Image (tube, rainbow, N blue to C red):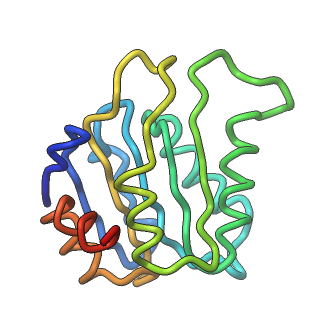
Amino acid sequence: MGVDAIRHRTLWLWQIGDVRELDVARLPAAPFVCLLAWHVRGRAADEIGLVARRLLDAGCAYVCVTGDDCERVHDIFEEEVVGAGDLPAAPLPMSTRHADESTEQVLWSWLCCTEIPYEWGKQAVDSLAIVIDGAFDGELLRRACKDPLGFEARYLF
């Protein structure tokens, strides 16, 4: 989709109609950054946990979540990291939730504020945006991915 020359990341966009279309075999190499836009109100915690576990197992080092009830998605991601109550060995993934933020604010956070902890041993070279069932402005996301520096300049100034 695009390249962020400042953070040296390839930007990917997946727009899927249903969570069952999430193809873990196509996920980027670890560590990667993910924007997950998904309206989950009324969804079972097990379904959200399954998505979280798939992303974490694939090497998601930083996830930004947005959409209806994204606070719950964030909390379930953290529960998947902690598991039965014991913190796993480093590296620990980061997660942020973006309720009540504009589309531009969410994109800026995903593009510009997702440095991963040094314990991962290297920086992410891929940033993946997953939009499930139209939960995000796909056109603005496409434009930001094609020209991340232009988006950042327009957003900041």
Instruction: Answer above or below: position of 1 versus 125.
Output: below
Tell me if 146 is positioned left or right of 26 in this view. Answer: left
Instruction: Answer above or below: position of 90 versus 61.
Output: above
Q: Residue drawn 48% across and 45% down?
A: 55
Q: Residue drawn 38% across and 79% down?
A: 17
In the picture as drawn, the residue positioned furthest to the right comes out as 85
Quadrant including the C terminus: bottom left
Tell me if 148 is positioned left or right of 52 in this view. Answer: left
Name which quarter of the figure residue 144 lies in. bottom left
Residue 117 rendering spot, x and y as whole percentages: 51, 27
Using the image as rendered, state which of residue 139 and residue 50 is in the foreground: 139
Residue 71 rendering spot, x and y as whole percentages: 71, 66
Q: Residue drawn 38% across and 31% down?
A: 31
Tell me if 129 is positioned left or right of 117 in this view. Answer: left
Using the image as rendered, state which of residue 1 and residue 46 is in the foreground: 1
Exactly how many numbered labels are in the figure? 0
Quadrant including the N terminus: bottom left
Tell me if 64 is positioned left or right of 124 in this view. Answer: right
Using the image as rendered, state which of residue 122 and residue 69 is in the foreground: 122
Residue 120 rendering spot, x and y as whole percentages: 46, 21
Name which quarter of the figure residue 146 lies in. bottom left
Q: Residue drawn 49% across and 80% down?
A: 102
Instruction: Answer above or below: position of 25 versus 155.
Output: above
